[in-house]
Amino acid sequence: MRVVRLIEEGLVERFREGRIRGPIHTCDGQEAVGIGVTAVLERQDLITSTHRGHAHFIGKGLDPGRVLAEIFGKETGYCRGRAGHMLIASAEHGLLGGSAIVGGALPIAIGQALGFQVQGSDRVVVPFFGDGAAHIGMFHEALNIAGLWKLPVVFVCEHNEYGLTVHARHQSPVEDIAVRAEGYGMPGIKVDGNDAVAVYRAAADAVAGARRGEGPTLIEAKTYRMTGFSTSDQGGYQPEKEMAAWRSRDPIRRLRRALAKALAKGRLDALDGEAGETVAQAFAYAEDSPLPPAEEAYAEEFAPPRGPHA
Ligand SMILES: Cc1ncc(C[n+]2csc(CCOP(=O)(O)OP(=O)(O)O)c2C)c(N)n1
Ligand SMILES: [Mg+2]
């Protein structure tokens, strides 16, 4: 979680200096969801991510230096700089590429899960998505078929109270997305998304059930987006009182307090120091990496022509 926070702080700083193209969507305040869930998963399990995916990438084991290189558009990035910040993929880590369509990864995730079921594998698929994505058609279609066929999927909704600049109360007649699970024949679990241990436990139960062939679960993690929608957001619509309340529930500080009792004195500071070192090295690696050669700008962008018209 600390690595993710530091990566994002570094990215926002560099965006402001004009050193990164395109907006950055941070998961500031939401780190416990991505990290708590991916901590349960094995490398061969699959995830799909969103435009707010840094915790998913780091949690699934991607190298921070190569993630940052991708965001800087460098040759050493996971997709050789083609995917950038939002669409990063790594097959070897079980990270399916993102989708610019909000909720667009949900049917992709259940397609993969059907594949695992047909193979008799115990691998699971975890699509992450926002509260906004829970209001589109593909969400309902995906949950319906996953519930009907008992697919090995754990749906993880990161309810951060906003879709773009619009509060959830203007987007949904129900407060909890978790209640929708009942209509699709699966458990709907509401969890404190700012409590990494609670998230981990909820995910562990749901993933174990999916591996045993018991079918899908919908986990709704209640959390909050501490910054604007992205670095392009002018802000001003998140009430200060609301932000202050959530700031006091910062997931990193909460976990730190919980761990302070369990760990030897000085251990947490040492871990913080290691996180800082990891992120400093990752930025140096990304910034020192070469850009892809200009003549290869379109390489791998399109499938090679096939068939009678090739
Ligand atoms: C189908 C679709 N509609 C609208 C958009 C524009 N859009 C991008 S992100 C976003 C808000 C998504 O909100 P949510 O799913 O809650 O994710 P969050 O940004 O809060 O993490 C919207 C409307 C889009 N990319 N795709
Ligand atoms: Mg949202």
Image: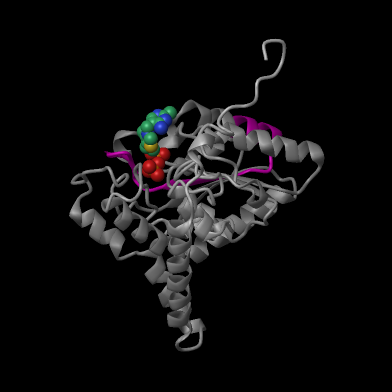
Q: Which residues are magenta?
A: 143-167
In the picture, residue 268 is in which quadrant? Answer: bottom left
Along the viewing direction, whichever of 113 and 43 lies nearer the viewer = 43
The quadrant of the rendering that contains the C terminus is top right
Tell me the residue at 44%/49% (across/down): 71
Q: Position of residue 65 (x, y in %)?
A: 50, 59
- Coloration mode: one colour
Residue drawn at the location 46% of the way across and 89% of the way down: 265
Is residue 154 on the magenta stretch?
Answer: yes
Visible in this render: residue 133? yes
x and y, in percent, of residue 73 in the image: 45, 46
* Residue plotted at (71% across, 35% down): 114
Residue closest to the eye, 113 or 219: 113
Relative image position of residue 34 (x, y in whole percent)? 50, 55
Q: Nearer the viewer, residue 297 or 146?
A: 297
Q: Is residue 250 above or below residue 190?
A: below
Location of residue 266 in the rendering, given as x and y in whole percent from the top left corner? 45, 87
